[in-house]
Amino acid sequence: SDLLDALAAARADDAVRAIVLTGQGAFFCAGFDLAAPPRDLAQTVRLGLLYRDAHVALLGCPKPTIAMVNGHATAGGLVLVLACDYR
């Protein structure tokens, strides 16, 4: 939800000419935390929708999106990279 909020704010701000996504540490993005405790069905559905909505927002963004890949981008992290215009 933080990524969706940041994308919406950047999209609405006329001073923003491009959006750059980057990670921290050894990973750009490692995808889902599979070691996290199991979620109930409602939380699982919500997480899936947020994941999809973030990718759709990146793909449909009218401003250029750039994935500044500073490390590994595995699983869902790679999908996030591919949703950006430039890598």
Image (cartoon, rainbow, N blue to C red):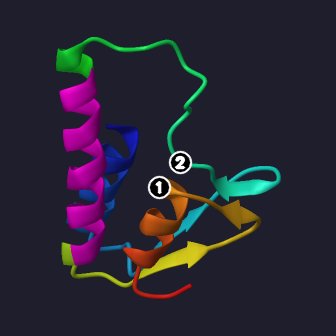
Percent across and percent down for residue 4 are 29, 48
Q: Is residue 64 above or below residue 23?
A: below
Image quadrant holding the N terminus, namely top left
Q: What is the x, y in percent for residue 49?
A: 19, 41
Whether tag 1 and tag 2 are in contact, CB under 8 A, the answer is yes
> Quick one: SS at disc 1?
helix
What amino acid does circle 2 point to? Gly
Residue at point 75%, 68% (across, down): 70
Q: Residues within 10 Å of mark 1 (few under 14, many from 20)?
A: some
Q: Quadrant of residue 14?
A: bottom left
Tell me the SS state at disc 2: loop
Q: Which residue corresponds to mark 2?
A: 31
Q: Which residue carries the number 1 mark? A: 76
The quarter holding residue 7 reads: bottom left
**Horizontal and vertical percent position of residue 76:** 47, 55
User: Who comes first in sequence, dot 1 or dot 2?
Assistant: 2
